[in-house]
Amino acid sequence: MSPPTRVQVDTDAQTLTITWDDDHTSVFPLDALRQACPCANCNGDAVEAIAPPAEPREPETTWTDLSIEPAGSVGIRITWDDGHNAGIYRWDRLRRLQPKDERTT
Ligand SMILES: [Zn+2]
């Protein structure tokens, strides 16, 4: 699949926003994304869906110092505040975690 056109972290809103090449936008709460870390230790592969943030709430953890780097052409590697960066978030999986919502346009 094509890589997204835009990947943006908002540490105020605690979200990672991905804009796909078909203009679909996925908004992931950082907390949920951390829990979905696909590395062998975290085994977040079991996470099948991440809902977009419904309304502002107090996250369990506030992530303020994460960095994102490309992992080849397949996805991104996120280094979290806690230093963890073992998981590669593949584009196809991210898209599957929050597919296009057909109810809205
Ligand atoms: Zn992990």
Image (tube, rainbow, N blue to C red):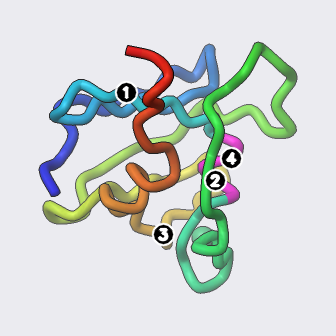
- State the image coordinates of residue 23 (x, y, percent, origin top left): 23, 25
Q: Which residue is mark 2?
A: 34
Vertical placement of residue 40 versus 47, above or below: below
Cα distance in 3D space between marks 2 and 3: 9 Å
Contact check, label 2 and label 4, Cβ < 8 Å: yes
Camera-nearest label, 3 or 1 = 1
Q: Magenta span: helix, strand or loop, mainly?
A: helix
Type of amino acid under label 3: Gly
Q: Residues within 10 Å of mark 3 (few under 14, many from 20)?
A: many
State the quadrant of the C terminus: top left
Disc 4 versus disc 3: distance between alpha carbons? 14 Å
Dot 2: within a 10 Å radius of its alpha carbon, few (fewer than 14), some, or many (20 or more) residues? many
Depth-wise, is mark 4 or mark 3 nearer the camera?
4
Q: Which residue is mark 4?
A: 32
Label 3: which secondary element: loop
Name the spot of residue 73 as percent of width and height, x first. 14, 61
* Amino acid type, callout 1: Thr
Image label count: 4
